[in-house]
Image: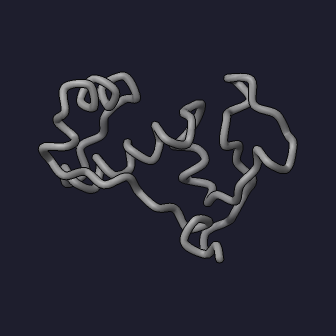
Amino acid sequence: METMCIDHFLPKAKGGSNHLENLMPSCRSCNSTKGTSDLETFRLRVAVHKKTNGIKFTADQINFLKEKNVLTVLKVEPELFFFEQKQG
């Protein structure tokens, strides 16, 4: 199993805090890849990456594709992360 770390729902760089409500578990590579993206943007980046066989898009490119309804046409479903799958 990959080393886990603590990530922020809202990145500290965008005003997020270290309060428990803003923290989530994350594997080190996902945390690094997410960088300063918010969770929803990262969720779409991962889903598009999977749907397009590994093509990487920036957050701005994802937002552009979303605005043009390309994600709907491609039937991109937002990624459900590990910590969300294990709730309940």
**Picture coordinates of residue 12 (x, y %)?**
74, 29
Residue at (70% x, 48% y) in the render: 7
Relative to 8, does residue 83 appear above or below in the rendering? below
Q: Quadrant of residue 14?
A: top right
**Observer-nearest of 44 and 32:** 44
Q: Farthest front residue?
A: 88
Q: Is residue 24 left or right of residue 76?
A: right
Residue at (49% x, 41% y) in the render: 40
Relative to 82, does residue 57 appear above or below in the rendering? above
Residue at (65% x, 77% y) in the render: 88
Residue at (19% x, 33% y) in the render: 69
Q: Farthest left residue?
A: 73
Relative to 87, does residue 48 appear above or below in the rendering? above
Q: Farthest right residue?
A: 19
Q: Quadrant of residue 3?
A: bottom right
**Picture coordinates of residue 10 (x, y %)?**
67, 35
Q: Is residue 22 left or right of residue 46?
A: right
**Picture coordinates of residue 18 (x, y %)?**
85, 40
Quadrant in which the N terminus appears: bottom right
